[in-house]
Image (cartoon, helix red, strand yellow):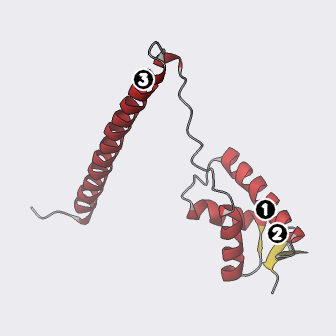
Amino acid sequence: MADTHVVSALKNKRGELAGTIDALQDQLRQAFIDMDHIDASLRMFVPDIELEEIKPKPLPPRHRAFKGQVTRAILAMLRKEGPMDARAITLRLMAERELNLNDAGLQKAMHKRIGAALRNLRERTLVVSEAGKSGLLRWSVVV
């Protein structure tokens, strides 16, 4: 029996996930090796160290951006798309970074971050704002 497009798509997705799992297992194995090396180095300097007392540091949240990344993305978006309001910029940026658009808390945090970046850009005279028809400020790049 010939595969339908659904079955072949599911097979492709399964293969993709299996590859991701393999890569993550390799990363995990390497992290354990690296940690063993660090533990051995620590024991050279402090032989009676209690390694279990060293607390693991949490990873930064996935939505965390590198310094300047949001600003660069905003400027690129405004240059390409023209004037936009902060809400549209927020939704577009979240979609580009593959963040959950249905997460209201994350959307609010991103909106605040983008608003702060826009105000900073306005202070640096890189963007200007003007009142839009809907009452929201529309932002555009200074030419």
Name the kind of residue labelled 3 in the image: Met
Give the x, y percent position of residue 114: 75, 60
Q: How many marks?
A: 3
Name the kind of residue labelled 1 in the image: Ala
Asked if the residues shown at circle 1 and circle 3 are in contact, with their CB atoms under 8 angstroms apart, the answer is no
For residue 101, what is the image quadrant?
Answer: bottom right
- Mark 3 lies on a secondary structure that is helix
- Residue, x 68% and y 80% (percent of image)? 81
Asked if the residues shown at circle 1 and circle 2 are in contact, with their CB atoms under 8 angstroms apart, the answer is yes
User: Where is mark 2, residue-wise?
Assistant: 121
Of residues 51 and 6, the one nearer the viewer is: 51
Q: Left or right of 35: which side holds 125?
A: right
**Farthest residue in the left direction?**
1
Q: Left or right of 61: which side holds 75?
A: right
For residue 79, what is the image quadrant?
Answer: bottom right
**Farthest residue in the top direction?**
48
